[in-house]
Amino acid sequence: MLIKKKASWALPESAATPEHVYMNRRSWLKAAGFSGLGLASTMMGGGMASTALAAITGYPALRNDAYSLDRAITDEEEATTYTNFYEFGSSKNIWKKTRNMTTDPWAVTIDGLVESEMTLDAEDLVRQMGGLEERLYRHRCVEAWAMAVPWTGVPLAKLIALAKPLPEAKYLRMETFLDPDVAPGQKQGWYPWPYVEGLTIAEAQNELAFLATGIYGKSMPNQNGAPIRLVVPWKYGFKSIKSIVRFSFTAEQPVSFWQELAGTEYGFWANVNPTVPHPRWPQRTERLLGTGQRVQTEIFNGYGDQVAGLYADMSFDNNRTLYF
């Protein structure tokens, strides 16, 4: 079953996760008067929640019911302690290594082919893009594991509107911070640091493309990409770049981190495709975090109704690489 807008299929929130587990926690947080500032000192999945956006009240944000799920939300501890963040190493327990990462202040630069380049603090950037909302999305890693989580943030299209790109801008290039003293993985010279990812402008303007500042009704923990990260649920997880410091609008297609490192295995598009295996990971099924259940993977991770039109002029024959 493809994931569609609520008008055509979406389940009620109580069907996505047990009401007494998720709704009661949200209600308790509101009743207790917790804001982003109060939650910034709350331990989350063993890692510290980011303080960079703590001054922005609204956690938990109102849920946008147009984006729901056909599976249960992944347990919070599982989603916040089983993560990839190569800047800090290649193990999955990265949350233990990100505690010294400071996200307040956090400067974000918007440059390239735009009307006026700017550098803003992450908090100011989010304020200018408007109010936060919560969305339920699937997340599919190329390593064939998956989760379903409630992200808080703003549509990426709002950043594009703020940036006012010039007509010749065709791509959005995004870049992660570079600080080897904080992120020891960046001392490994064989990696092409800093981490870079990119989208076409059309992809970035798609309704699903999201800039997340929080998860599970709280500000983002460091290990999940604090203070601001990309979420593009129809693509493999490595496209959803974490801890972004730069958005650059370009005329040429950017070369992504993994594409530069291993171009025969990783390409620019990275759309989820169960019919084309990665050299190390078959893609027909995925393991759900928390339960271990294996389920069938869907083209575009189930979001074909929203994104297939972006690639209407591309060939999907069997000779295409995994990342078409």
Image (spheres, rainbow, N blue to C red):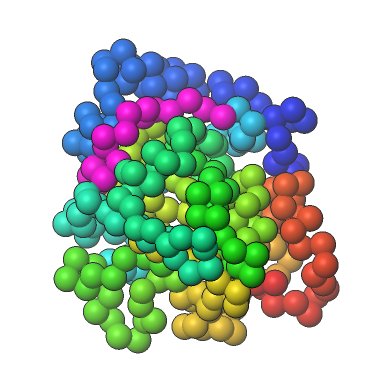
The secondary structure that most of the magenta stretch takes on is loop
Question: Which quadrant holds the N terminus?
Answer: top right
Quadrant of the rendered image containing residue 92: bottom left
In this rendering, does residue 193 appear at all? yes
Question: Which quadrant holds the C terminus?
Answer: bottom right
Spot occupied by residue 197 in the image (x, y as percentages of width and height) = 49, 68
In this rendering, does residue 281 appear at all? no
Magenta highlight on residue 313: no
Q: Residue furthest top?
A: 31
Q: Is residue 49 left or right of residue 259?
A: left
Q: Residue at x 23, y 70 (%)?
A: 179
Near-viewer residue (242 or 170): 170
Q: Is residue 279 left or right of residue 185?
A: right
Q: Which stretch appears magenta?
A: 46-64
Against 23, residue 70 (above or below) is: below
Q: Residue at x 53, y 36 (%)?
A: 135
Q: Residue furthest front?
A: 115
Q: Residue at x 47, y 83 (%)?
A: 261
Spot occupied by residue 287 in the image (x, y as percentages of width and height) = 55, 53
Against 314, residue 75 (above or below) is: above
Quadrant of the rendered image containing residue 195: bottom left
Q: Residue at x 29, y 32 (%)?
A: 36
Against 4, residue 96 (above or below) is: below
Spot occupied by residue 226 in the image (x, y as percentages of width and height) = 33, 51
Near-viewer residue (243 or 127): 127
Spot occupied by residue 198 in the image (x, y as percentages of width and height) = 54, 67
Magenta highlight on residue 56: yes
Near-viewer residue (27 or 72): 27
